[in-house]
Image (cartoon, rainbow, N blue to C red):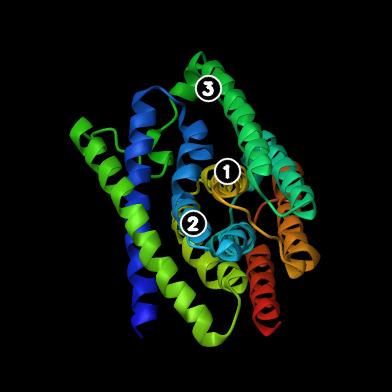
Amino acid sequence: MLDWFLVGLGLTILLLSGDLLVRGAVNLSLRLGIPPLLVSLTIVAFGTSAPELLITIEAVGNGFPGMALGNIIGSNIANVLLVLGIPALITTMHTAECNTRKSYIFMLGATGLFIVMCFFGPLSWPHGLIMLGVLVLILIDAGRDAMRHRSDSHACALDLEEVEGADPKITGKSIAFFLVIGLIGLPLGADLFIDGAVNIAEQFGVSDTVIGLTLVAIGTSLPELATTVMAALRRQADVALGNVIGSNMFNILAIMGVGSLIGTIPVPHEILTFDLWVMLAASLVLFPFVLLGWNLSRIWGIVLSSAYLVYMGVVLIN
């Protein structure tokens, strides 16, 4: 029971700290004049990936690289099938109106690059440098988009409430407080979460990779789920879809990039033969919604959520 308590406590601290960090970073970014849509695709996505980052650092640093690898792959699968599936069950998301094509192409490219690197693994610092280098190029491109948006009066007039955590009335002291508490709480929560998850894996006789693909992945995907559900209820499909696409891209390039710099990450055979391809298939599922103008209806919500349950069953049974 103590281990489950540690997991629950660590996850709670992670989620609360991540939320505060997102609120602080979002409002700071908006004050600097960065457009709301760009903030949702970058700052919000990166902020909601903060639990994955801290858990990856803790896992690799403490000798559990399989948990770090499973966390990233499992989170990317959960982000598409679960994080988009559950909100679609609540209400139809009109993704046909979204303009996330460019980010989606970048996400597919990052996914393909990651799969290739895994086959040339184990992942180590050269792989990490490549992934972080690609991320830098994408951020430079995003910066250029931001400059173009600044000259677009319509884009600048977008309602700031469409960005998760935006508050036009927030003070500078509050922004600083959110950032500090978020940065302190994240590593503390990650440490408690990892300790509990490792002990649970030992009790049930499963590998740290399986725990990463299941328990850790679901836990660290909760911020994305909360953000996406709220966006769906507010009829803001572009924020919901942009958050998932941005988070998946950051999970691979930033989090796995940093993890590969910290230590060597072996790639188990089962990851190469199954989980990587499920992640790729989940990424390709977004193709008709992003590029063909399909709406994410309740039927698709059932399909995506059911597919995730099947995937979880296969991982746990094997």
Q: Name the quadrant containing residue 185.
A: bottom left
Q: Name the quadrant containing residue 96.
A: top right
Which residue is at the front of the view, 112 or 60?
60
156 w.r.t. 41: above or below: above
Q: How far apart are marks 2 and 1 (CA)?
A: 26 Å
Whole-percent x, y for residue 17 in the image: 32, 53
Mark 1 crowdedness (10 Å alpha carbons): few <14, some 14-19, many ≥20: many
111 w.r.t. 106: above or below: below
Mark 3 crowdedness (10 Å alpha carbons): few <14, some 14-19, many ≥20: some
* Quadrant placement of the N terminus: bottom left
Foreground tag (2 vs 1): 2
Amino acid bearing label 3: Ala
Give the residue pinned by disc 2.
Answer: 61
In the image, farthest residue toward the top: 151
Q: How far apart are marks 3 and 1 (CA)?
A: 16 Å
Answer yes or no: is residue 234 visible: no
91 w.r.t. 143: above or below: below
Nearer-N-terminus badge (3/2): 2
Give the residue pinned by disc 1.
Answer: 246
Nearer-N-terminus badge (2/1): 2
Answer yes or no: is residue 90 visible: yes
Foreground tag (3 vs 2): 2
1 w.r.t. 183: above or below: below
Which circle marks residue 146 in the picture?
3
Amino acid bearing label 2: Gly
* Residue at left offset 45%, top offset 78%: 199
Whole-percent x, y for residue 2 in the image: 34, 82
Q: Under tag 1, what secondary structure?
A: helix
In the rendered structure, are the residues bearing label 2 and label 1 in contact, judged by CB atoms less than 8 Å apart?
A: no
In the rendered structure, are the residues bearing label 3 and label 1 in contact, judged by CB atoms less than 8 Å apart?
A: no
* Residue at left offset 32%, top offset 61%: 13
